[in-house]
Image (cartoon, rainbow, N blue to C red):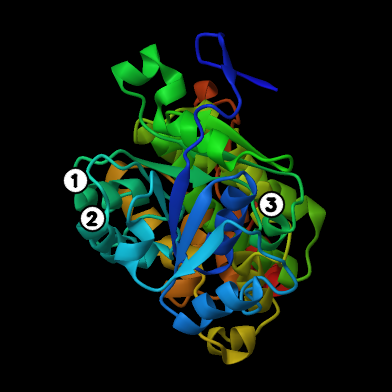
Amino acid sequence: MRHQSLSGDPLPSHANRYRSAAVIGAGSWGTALAATLARAGVRTQLWGRDRAVIDQINRTRQSPDFLPDVDLPEGLFGVHALADALAGVDVALIVVPSRSVRSVARAVAEHAAPGMPVAVCAKGIEAETGLLMTQVAEEELGRRPVGCVSGPTFAVETALGHPTAATVAFPFTYADRLNPAESPAVRLALSLSTESFRAYVSDDLVGVEIGGALKNVIAIACGMMTGAGFAENTRAALITRGLDEMKRLAEALGGRRETVTGLSGVGDLTLTCSSPTSRNMALGLQLGRGVARAACFDGAPVVVEGEVNATSVTDLARKLGVDLPICETVRSILHEGRPLGEAFAALWARPIEAEPRAMDLSFSHPATDKDIATLAERIA
């Protein structure tokens, strides 16, 4: 099998794989990525905070708390000390919740070799700064190349070897353009690629990361409306207009609209908005059915990235003057106490617009206050 370089010249499929990798974060997605690397022949050291989880991986080749009934491959080694996980490896992947990326990147910087590429596999926008996850990591990691891995990937399916595709994005330097085979993006994409995992390469970090950050918020909206009793028409409308919100924010930050129509954008959006396997969709479903937030997930303290990012995404959009009506609706329900029915009825009664932005049209919606109140009651 041969790969094509950016110039069209064929590249050997295995020659440029990394030989070793550290995966920082032994949750479900971190363990799935570690398993994928190991199956591709990359010696992989997996670090996690919970010593019991690491010990069990080494002893039984399983992680029942995070990936039940998945056999983990040889070549994956659980490691207790972060310094040991990073010692001598060629590349590192940070796979922790978005709120932990800064502190973990700071710790990685203490032990990672100078110049080691680091891929961030968390999705979101830092609330305090408005920075994307790779930008947060860059502030802590110094001059090391920083990229990301993102796409429509449920951890269990990836770990079980279901055909899966994702995007690996890193900045491309002048040297990378001349010799793409040696770029971090291409090398990591080859290192992750197996008979079932297919990696694509991008140089548009902004476009890739904006897709990952907004899709979680849109998925909560889809869950809310599904939980309230609506079906396919409603979810299709939210997905499609949510995609437009992704494009607008990505473009405002210098990303490419084309990127958002790829795996990390529309692909991840479609997956997350279509299955209760997603914690974001699951949260929305429960709220749409009238379950109080404190009682969702049977009262367990489940981290839902879209819940956190509903605020950070809209804060950033407001600063840039970008209108994100669906994300704003989710924020108003989750963080401002607005009733779900009232919020979504108002969203549907927004001014009529043209889909081609070039038409630049807007007309007041003809629905009356009574019409809006009736829809709000149906949703509630």
Residue at 69% over, 63% down: 156
In which quadrant of the rendered image does the N terminus lie? top right
User: Whole-percent x and y of residue 20?
Assistant: 46, 47
Give the alpha-carbon distance from disc 2 to disc 3, as whole Å: 33 Å
Who's the residue at 65% across and 68% down the image?
224
- Kindly identify the amino acid type of the residue bearing the numbered disc 3: Leu
Q: Secondary structure at mark 3?
A: helix
Mark nearest the camera among 3 and 1 is 1
Residue 254: percent from left, percent from top: 35, 30
**Residue corresponding to mark 1:** 142
Q: Nearer the viewer, residue 173 or 204?
A: 173
Disc 3 or 1, which lies upstream in sequence?
Answer: 1
Q: Which residue is mark 3?
A: 271
Q: Residues within 10 Å of mark 1 (few under 14, many from 20)?
A: few
CA distance separating discs 3 and 1: 34 Å
Who comes first in sequence, dot 2 or dot 3? 2
Quick check: 277 above or below 274?
A: below
Front-lying residue, 363 or 220: 220
Disc 2 + disc 1, Cβ < 8 Å: yes
Circle 2 sits on which residue?
109
Residue 302 versus residue 307 in the image, above or below: below
Residue drawn at x 71%, y 79% as measured from the top left: 289
Secondary structure at badge 1 equals: loop
Q: CA distance from mark 2 to mark 1?
A: 8 Å
Relative vertical location of residue 95 with respect to residue 295 in this rendering, above or below: above
